[in-house]
Amino acid sequence: ALYRDREMGRDVIIKTSKKELRDGTPELAVAMREVAVQASVPRHRNIVPYLGHWRDPKFKLRIVLEYEAGGELTRYVEG
């Protein structure tokens, strides 16, 4: 979903996990490895920058990415 970061004055995308990710579960471990990979990728013009993450009170993982105008990748890729 698209949101406005009021502090930075820019649009961001927040992706939300479909299921609860509780402490000690394999699903959380996998998700956190993915977050670590996203956080470690250096800036590149073809990669949407990772900005941060958190888990909400309902144990859903929220990943914040920089908004890139131009639509979703699914519009350009067959699947």
Image (spheres, helix red, strand yellow):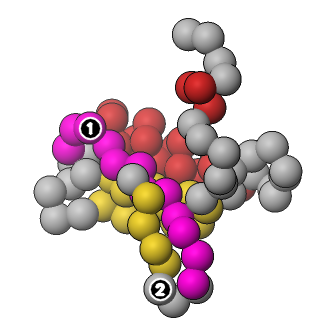
Looking at the image, which residue is at 24% across and 63% down? 56
Residue 62 at x, y percent in the picture: 37, 56
Query: Amino acid under label 1?
Result: Lys
Q: Can residue 33 be seen?
A: yes
Compared with 38, 6 (above or below) is below
Q: Can residue 50 be seen?
A: no
Q: Which mark is residue 27?
A: none
Residue 2 at x, y percent in the picture: 44, 59
Compared with 47, 79 (above or below) is above
Which quadrant holds the C terminus? top right
The residue stretch that appears in magenta: 9-20
Looking at the image, which residue is at 14% across and 57% down? 58
For marks 2 and 1, give the CA distance. Answer: 26 Å
Query: Amino acid under label 2?
Result: Arg
Residue receiving disc 1: 18
Specify whether 58 is left or right of 4: left
Q: Is residue 28 magenta?
A: no
The residue tagged with tag 1: helix, strand or loop? loop
Q: Nearer the viewer, residue 51 or 46?
A: 46
| First along the sequence among labels 2 and 1 | 2
Nearest to viewer (mark 2 / mark 1): 2
Q: Residues within 10 Å of mark 1 (few under 14, many from 20)?
A: few
Q: Is residue 12 magenta?
A: yes
Q: Which mark is residue 6?
A: 2
Q: Residue furthest top?
A: 79
Q: Residues within 10 Å of mark 2 (few under 14, many from 20)?
A: few
Looking at the image, which residue is at 65% across and 53% down? 69
Q: How many labels were placed on the picture?
A: 2
Residue 10 at x, y percent in the picture: 58, 76
Specify whether 28 is left or right of 8: left
